[in-house]
Amino acid sequence: MTRLLRICAAWLGLLAFFPAVAQQPGAPATPGTPAGIRRIADLPYGPDARQRMDVYLPANAHGAPVLVMVHGGAWMFGDKAAASVIDLKVEHWVRDQGFILVSVGYRFVPQVDVLQQAQDVARAVATAQASAPSWGGDAGRFVLMGHSAGAHLVALLGASPDIARQQGARPWLGTIALDSAALDTTGLMRRRHMNFYDRVFGSDPALWRAVSPTDTLAPGAAPVLLVCSTQRRDGSCTQSQQFAARVAATGGRAEVLPEDLSHAQINAELGLPGGYTAAVDGFVRSVGAQGAKATTGALGAQGAIGKPQS
């Protein structure tokens, strides 16, 4: 009974701490797609039932850039078709700018560990790159984006390109991490932390290092935009700034975009008109992934975002 109470307490703490995560399991799946958008549902990239991706195609795509979206859910749950993951992003990037959007599902802890989750995402990217020409997409103009746990996974792939290369993925133009507090996974696990992190990352420091974007950072990473919530109390913006400085020290490009939004809003409101979406658009343009129907936004043609970390 004591063990059951501890487990219940841990989950209650998790749901209170990450409201976006709390919404994920019961979030309504996207019931339909905007007019003119075609959806290919549950395209397999591996043998497991969770190794599936949904592809959203604009009308008459030809050489379209591709945005790969990786959902969150504390590495233990989540839904690639959740409204907060998909709806506004499809409207903004697919309908309005002519992108192809790929929403990736992946296996969960404890079925696999976090490194295997990153390998799942990399395998999905490789499959999407191979399929892009048949969709009317450009395999050379991919951008990776993830929220929460998904932000950690895309940041890990960006920091350690060998993980992606081993799964057959080719380099992509840029990475967008939407509010991760696990960029320094080793540091996170060595200080006081929420109990659910123990379920996710275990007790082996070797695994912590292997899945830590900070510890695995290698030269040659694609440019990265680190969006962080200034409302969080666990220092996601501090981690983002520290990680960006590490990237800059290797000669790479990393930018931090602090937003006065909750962890949930960082994901769900991306795509709404305003400065936040315009800033992300600026980064996407700056790495060369402008959509066929994109126009210059509030940041101008150069896509300058905040202050580069150096």
Image (spheres, grey):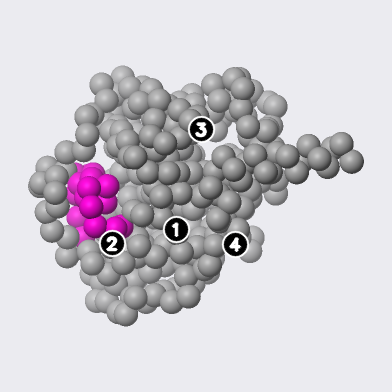
Residue at which label 1 appears: 85
Q: Is residue 74 above or below residue 61?
A: above
Residue at which label 4 appears: 26
Q: Upstream in the sequence, badge 3 or badge 1?
A: 1
Q: Position of residue 300 (x, y in %)?
A: 10, 46
- Can see residue 18? yes
Residue at which label 2 appears: 93
Q: Nearer the viewer, mark 4 or mark 3?
A: 4
Q: Please check the rendered image and state whether residue 70 is part of the magenta-colored stretch, yes or no.
A: no
Q: Considering depth in this image, is 105 or 259 the residue closer to the camera?
A: 259
Q: Residues within 10 Å of mark 4 (few under 14, many from 20)?
A: few
SS category of the residue bearing label 2: helix
Q: Position of residue 252 (x, y in %)?
A: 28, 28
Q: Upstream in the sequence, badge 2 or badge 1?
A: 1
What is the CA distance from the residue labelled 3 to the residue labelled 1? 20 Å
Query: Who's the residue at 45% across and 44% down the image?
Result: 263
Residue at which label 3 appears: 182
Q: Please check the rendered image and state whether residue 282 is part of the magenta-colored stretch, yes or no.
A: yes
Disc number for residue 125: none
**What range is drawn magenta here?**
271-291
